[in-house]
Amino acid sequence: MRRTSNRTGDHAMTTTPAPVVLDVQGLRKRYGQLEAVRGVSFQIHEGETYGLLGPNGAGKTTSISMICGLLSRDAGEVTVDGRKIDTGAVAAKAAIGVVPQDLAIYPDLSARENLDFFGRLYGLGGARLRQRAEECLELVGLADRAKERTDRFSGGMKRRLNIAIGLLHSPRLLLLDEPTVGVDPQSRNAILESVAALSREGMAVLYTTHYMEEAERLCDRVGIIDAGEIRAEGTRRELVELIGQEDQVRLTATGDLEAAAKAGRAVAGVSGAAVVEGRIEFVVENAGTVLPSLLEAVGRAGASVRGVDLVEPDLEAVFLHLTGRALRDAE
Amino acid sequence: MRIALLIAAKDLRQRLRDRSALLVAVVAPLGLAFIFAGLLGNATSFHATYVVADLDGGHLAHALRTDVIGSLATAGAASVTDVGTDAEARSTVSDGKADTAFVIPAGFTADINAGRAVTITLVGARNSGLETAVAQALARRFGDGVVTAQLAVATTAAAMGGAMTADQAAAIAGAATSMTPPVALADSAAPLRQLSLATYFAASMAIMFLFFSSTFGIVSLFDERRRGTLARILVGPVRPSEVLIGKTLAGIGAGLLAMTVLVIATTLLIKADWGAPLGVAALALGAILAATGISTFVASFCRTAEAAGSATAAVAITLGVLGGSFFPVNQAPDIMATLTLLTPHGWFMRGLGDLHGTGAVWTDALGPAAVLLAMGVAFGGVGLLRSRKLVTVQ
């Protein structure tokens, strides 16, 4: 079945088969006593953007490193475009484009020279390489800076070049590992637009992030990962439905917010509580019933409530519901 | 191999843009060779200035002046001028116009003929130790000749019962001093294989700094790891061995570039005479492989680019000292000459010396070049095996 996306998280099914580009099954990795990845499984179809949403240390980068063959795995299988991937699968790795979390460019080469080098590694050359380099530079908005050494670039420009290198060889699967970390809002927007454009062109994209807004904006489906496990997977709507009839209550308050969140968590009917960006988020069974007790508990904990919002649950609320913590709590 | 060449070409491009690398690879060795050769350059060609005050005027004084001291002038090793008085001779030396003065006293010839002791006075300038030592040797040589002649005359006179004319005595003395020594030292090869100081220091600095050029390939691997570009390369359709080969080729390429520039520059700027081009090329290639191999071996014990850079620099300088990069080995104790053969520097310099022997041809350098190649293969092979961990996924 071909998946089409309206970027709101709902998929319309058509009769056209949608090829699976990435198939990950039972991926495991242990570092000594720490099991960093614990049986991660998911699939990504052609033209689909799949988000791995989780806090730092959840196992996102380790999973991506195993998927692209950079890291050996203790168990599991990875198939890209029908070919098994492991650390020795040299030819099969050509189907993957990787945008690492940390910048991986040569500062003493120009943007164009960086693209030329990595393009030739993937077998591009001549007119094809020139064309792809120009297209990629255009896509990330660096066409007019192509001949400039990259050590003169801003952080955002380096990030965009980092992405351009990953998609230079027109991979079937693009792995983006937190590509917007440390990027200014303008560059972040440009990056997200670029990724959306690639997905529209049919590229399968695996996008890891700990920014809930990015996952909601970009991804057709999201896997919520925590402590090396995918806790839930689906479209945004499917994930929000996991909360069921629960409501998300957002309190604007002053005082000891952590103590207030802890006190609120003990109230009957509250399934999750966390301090997020100076506010307290609660997931409750029925806001109308629970709210008076909740406000009383928060007040007793020493917080002065200035405002109460009942908001539509989002992926942040889903994470809170699934793990009992906010996404940023775990960082 | 395509990938390895691609990585090597990229590394060399980066290397050529690094001004500090240019400084280390070319400017420093060229500058040091220039300085060393300039400082010590006069030591290779001996030339003295002597002044002679012949206060005697007899035939033996004339023989000393013309046949002994004058022979150096004839050979081009000295300039000799004559003055009339002892004071004039001394002032010529003290004024710095001559290195040493010979003062032949009045009655010199008569005293020798009479069998009396004579004294030749030598006055040496403060900074002309070597020239004065040569003058002393000349005077002793003359004295030895006189003793030989006197002994021959006395022996003959005794045999003849003491009856000998002056002409007979002179003939015997002449025959005694002109006899060919029964023992002669044959030393045809050693001095002829000696390099000029300009060539010596050009070559010794070139091979010492070659280690700094050749090491960059393997050291850049640490930089690539830290920068994340190595991981980016390895997620592509690339074998880890191709990365290692590429880095090794980059080191060899950098060494080749540095050596080529240095050979040409020292030839043009300080008149270094490297020898037959094919022989020099074989030696240079062997030295580059040896330097790259040893650098790779040393770096394989390190964990960071900084540690690898420091370790290879320490090894380069130690080998340079042992290998005679800072002083000609033929002026050092014998043990040093033996130790040089443990270093690529020693074999490189030996090979260059072989190219300067009498009737030398370029193939004379192949022996030392083969030793250098073996060093490179042995150390480089082990180093590459050990370096696999740098490009191995975990």
Image (cartoon, coloured by chain):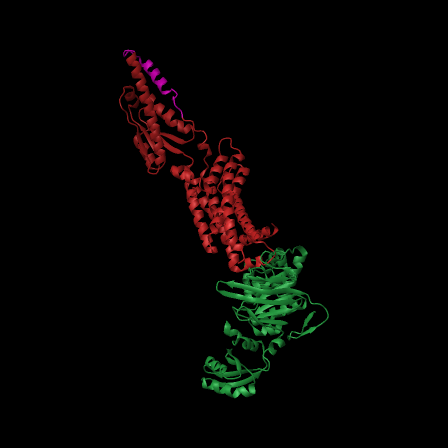
Chain colours: A green, B red
Q: Quadrant of residue A315?
A: bottom right
Q: Residue at 53% of width from left, 87% of height from top?
A: A291
Q: Is residue B173 magenta?
A: yes
Q: Nearer the viewer, residue B179 or B226?
A: B226
Please say whether residue B83 is visible from this viewpoint.
Answer: no
In percent of width and height, residue A268 lies at 51, 84
Q: Where is residue A225 in the image (x, y as percent from the top left)?
A: 56, 70
User: Where A236 sits versus B375, above or below?
Assistant: below
Task: Name the residue rendered at 62%, 76% in the picture.
Answer: A238
Relative horizontal placement of residue B91, taking residue B224 as reference (left or right): left
Q: Indicate the position of residue A72 as horizontal and vertical percent values.
A: 55, 59
Q: In this picture, which residue range is highlighted in magenta? A: B160-184
Horizontally, is A97 left or right of B46 in the view? right
Position above or below: A59 against B153: below
* Residue B35 percent across, percent down from the top left: 44, 44
Specify whether residue B360 is painted magenta.
no
Quadrant housing residue A213:
bottom right
Q: In which quarter of the image is the N terminus of chain A?
A: bottom right
